[in-house]
Image: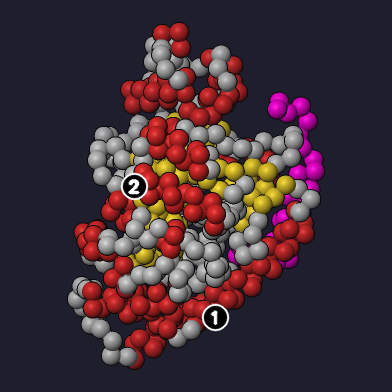
Amino acid sequence: MVTDTIWPPDFTKSAGPKYLVLIQSLRTAVRSGALERGYKMPTVRDLAWELGITPGTVARAYRMAADEGLVETTVGRGTFVAGAAPVQGGVSPGDPLITEVATDSIDLRACRVLDVGQEAAIRAGLSRLSDSPGFSYRDYPNSQTTAPAQTAVARWIGPDRAGRFETGDVVMGLGAQHSVIMALQTCLHGATPVILTETLCYPGVRHAARLLRAQVVGVEMDEYGLRPDRLEEALQRHGGQVLLTAPEAHSPTAVHTPVERRQEIARIAQRYQLRIIEDDCHCITRPDAPTYRAICPDHAWYISSLTKSVSSALRFGFAVCPRGQGAAAQQVAQSSFYGMPQPILDLGADLIDSGQAEEMRAGVVQAVQARVRMAVNILGQWDISWQPSLPFIWLRLPQGWRGSTFMRACDAAGVQIKSADEFALPDGQSPHSVRVSLTPDVSEAVLQGALERLSGLLARPPVNVDL
């Protein structure tokens, strides 16, 4: 331990929640140099024992420190000081959203699009564009040159899925994550805006909030998604301008929110003038359930992309704005990046209009469903949540396993997964659960072997685990 007046903190001389005292002391120690870059931090259990606090309090502070870039955690090695946090106004790097594919293990962390012939279809589309007159490729995109892509998106979404909307309500973005950030930029205001979201959520939510200097508040979930009573409590306690949610196919828990629950949440949103941003990027099928944009068109955004269903390389995303907010969102897009590159707009529209995007989507759905069936057959004896066309499963670990220890065991067995910690908000708690992607770039036989290894590990929890 570093003995010093800054670190570790003296809780007898500090007021407020212990995790906040701990993270504030850690910030000061790193910025002042009392804790030097590369210093190995005590384990969660050791520091908790030394300070006389609970391991959960230390884990909470360590997660916040990792989100701020103060420390880095490496599975199997520990937690190390990364260096001083960025100066006021800077942006902490945090964890990357794009997971690099591991070469020495089977990577079940990221959800990737399975190969169903996308490369040949995209090359054919580019060839068609090169032979057609089309628009000029030397000037900025404008409302006229963007309109064909907006019309194609309306066709791709389908009638009534996002309610009735005009092409001018569609704003094009560089994927769903970028479209979410544009929607947040349009909605958020004030010095300390508040974003409400699920207690466990896609890490991109934290990244977007950090970019926009917004506070993220988690809302408790149950087996049907966000709890309306907890949403109302959060609104009364924290305010909240935006609810960012994924009711159709939630990552990481695979929860699906039924229509009745969505309608109840929509009524709360209308009562509190809350904007809803629905991120539908993981849904690759054509569900009949109405989105929030269809239920409350004056308050809700619908966001998706071709990333999970056609090709991640295209970066072809879109947002359907609430009624009357299309012009404001278009202005945000122009102020941010002047609009989508015209070749990408034209290529995306061509793939949709030619029917090739739908063919690729159908192929991806079929391939994902085959892998889901395999995973359920192998891991079905354990406590899992899944959807037939969702490219991952949520695995609640049996007694004797913790998320961190199970990750290390999987890593030693040559399989990489994501623990619930990676989806928890900085001030939230995470269950002993993991998300297992079913779409690595490997054959079904190799995936089957990896899943069987996971099942074998689950049946052999470590001895003498303190629960």
Q: Is residue 367 left or right of residue 445?
A: left
| Residue under the point 55% across and 68% down | 288
**Mark 1 and mark 2: span between their CA atoms?**
40 Å
Determine whether 248 is above or below 132 in the image. Answer: above
Quarter of the rendering containing residue 77? top right
Mark 1 crowdedness (10 Å alpha carbons): few <14, some 14-19, many ≥20: some
Q: Position of residue 340 (x, y in %)?
A: 30, 69
Q: Amino acid at mark 1?
A: Glu
Residue 241 image position (x, y, % from top left): 34, 44
Q: How many marks?
A: 2
Q: Position of residue 114 (x, y in %)?
A: 58, 69
Magenta region: which residues?
A: 438-467
Badge 2, how many Cα within 10 Å: few under 14, some, many 20+? some
- Would residue 59 be counted in the magenta stretch? no
Q: Are marks 1 and 2 in contact (CB under 8 Å)?
A: no
- Is the residue 88 above or below the residue 129 in the image? above
Q: Give the residue displayed 34% in from the left and 26% down from the top.
A: 31
Looking at marks 1 and 2 on the same chain, the residue that comes earlier in the sequence is marked by 2
Secondary structure state at the residue bearing disc 1:
helix
Residue type (three-letter) at the residue carrying disc 2? Gln
**Image height check: is 427 above or below 16?**
below
Foreground: disc 1 or disc 2: 2
Task: Quickly name the residue at label 2.
Answer: 273
Is 449 inside the magenta-drawn segment?
yes
Q: Determine whether the residue tagged by mark 2 lies in a helix, strand or loop.
A: loop
- Return the residue at label 1: 359
Left or right of 413 in this view: 30 = left
Residue 149, by quadrant, is bottom left
Residue 228: image location, x then y, percent: 50, 43
**Where the C terminus falls, by quadrant?**
top right
